[in-house]
Image: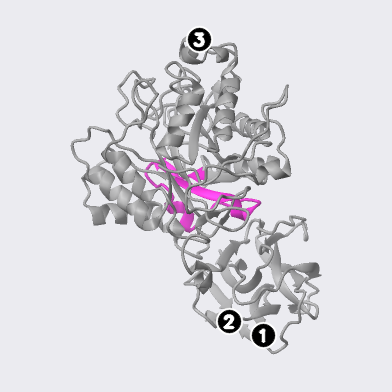
Amino acid sequence: MRQRLMTSCVAYLLTACSAGAPFASLTASSRDTTHDEMPGIEPAVLPLHTLGRYIVDATGRRLKLASVNWYGASDTELVVGGLDKAPLKVIVAQIKKLGFNSVRLPFSNLMLHATTVDPSAVVANSHLASLSPLMVYDEVVRELSAAGIYVIINNHTTHPMWCCNFDEDGLWFTHDYSEDQWLDDWTMMVKRYRDNPMVIAADLRNEVRISRHKNKLLPMVPNWGKGGHDWRAAAEKAGARVLAENPNLLVIVEGINFPREHLQGVANDPIRLPIADRLVYAAHNYAFISPSTLGEKYGDMQEPNLHAQVAREWGYVVSPARHFTAPVWVSEFGEAYNASDKKWFTYFVNYLRQQDLDFAYWALNPGPKASGDEELFGLLQDDWHEPISDWRTDQLRTILAPRLGPGIEPGWDNLPHNHFTTLIFSDFDSQIATDRRDWMPEAFKARCREGERIVGVSLGHKGSNRMNHGVLCSDYALNLGTEDVAVVPNSGAGRLDCPAGRHLVGLAQSRVSGKYQAAGALCAGSGRSLGTSCYEIRFAIKDDRRTLIPADWDPYARKGQCELNEYVSGVTIEQGVVSGLVCCH
């Protein structure tokens, strides 16, 4: 399957590289220095994180990724395209001219360990000929960063090749390259760019799909959360590795490309990361492929059908305040400059515009491709010195700037449904506070970010066992702060009560032999006096939500939720799990 605009919102002035290291450490002041920002859009402050369906900067303002794919380093030449046609600085200048604020930069695993570059692949940049392919990749990252362009490093393939078909690179490991080697490569890459804040994300793997195996008769089929060749489990391992080395990175997880499940598994089994607000999902779409083997191609669908199809596959993930809500970055889509039928591209861009989604166009590169075919999707002239301006770039210009989200949409902060986050902690820690101390070892924990409080808890089942599935966090109406947190272990009294003057910001539960047990609570002082008028709600039998804002945030579980202007001072425990809330105002 073939792989596949945009204005820089921010740039960070990078210091010169130190000898013996790919990137010099940046000072605190250089991390906040910006230039070339888009008119009318405030510069971002790194690092980034997520807030519901949006990527936001350190101030909570939305940053929309308007990206382009610049391929080549994962192909047979081992370096990005165009270095044989134009100086690196010239190519980067064209990216700026087109208006991209970020670049998806593919690599192959074997490229990382290759030692030499074919001089003919960098003839317009002869100073790169003596470097290894990874060192050339460093130079590309450095030049993009210096120009104020964000970099998303993308593991595209294992072997240097033109991706993607029914081949041995369908999974994240192959017969000659293990999962452990893949994980080690991610550790190495994250360490390599840890001191460059313009490297903002790790895109874990491109187009996971059915894979041939050299030593087996039957192909290997990936799945989402079912064991065996479980892409969800592998992505969680890699995401944990990435965040252990650099907790400031976004972790990007694409769904399963073939069979065309995409992100449909997220509804029941979302990705779980040690730092929950670093997760971004990715999706691809092209006119020439189909949702199923024998089905209608996306390019043949009428607009309502196309929109409904992609919403089922991945678009639903941006629904607000659900247990799975996260940003979706459409990291590949594109069309030939000479397409005879332009309707698919028009329909698809309309969907991106309506949903105001982050995206990455495929591709920057003019031809030829590594496969030898002409590249019709590219946005640069054949000499790589000037961009193309045509019907595609006309449409792409309409989705460059963010339209929705915090700091962008007028009145966004005044709407209560924008102030909720759901954290799932039935089988994993889900903590988004900047204080990441393990406040209750041997238990699964949910902890709201600073400034938020728990206002809801959900109760579900795993088999015959009851469990607390998630918590609902909010900062709406009450700015309580999170001073002087205190851990309250479960003493077996049937209640977990915060000390006077404190409110609930975290819950923990243990699991022994498949049975769940409330383990404790995390309570925080507010720095202000709290109201003491309280009442109890119970939700063991059915939902007891004192407000329906946001919508059904955990539809597979029963929920208790306080009013918008209330806080939780304690919880009640029945049959080992939390099934009641003490709401106060």
Q: Amino acid at mark 2?
A: Glu
451 falls in the magenta region: no
- Residue at 45% of width from left, 24% of height from top? 72
Mark 2–mark 1 distance (CA, rounded to whole Å): 9 Å
Q: Which residue is mark 3?
A: 119
Q: Earlier in the sequence, mark 1 or mark 3?
A: 3
| Residue 141 falls left or right of residue 25 | left
Q: Earlier in the sequence, mark 3 or mark 2?
A: 3
The relative height of residue 114 versus residue 526 in the rendered view (above or below) is above
Percent coordinates x, y for residue 370 in the rendering: 39, 20
Find residue 212 and report its image quarter.
Answer: top left
Q: Amino acid at mark 1?
A: His
- Magenta segment boundaries in residue numbering: 253-282
Mark closer to the observer (1, 3): 3
Mark 3–mark 2 distance (CA, rounded to whole Å): 66 Å
Residue 441 appears anywhere in the view: yes
Percent coordinates x, y for residue 468 in the rendering: 62, 68
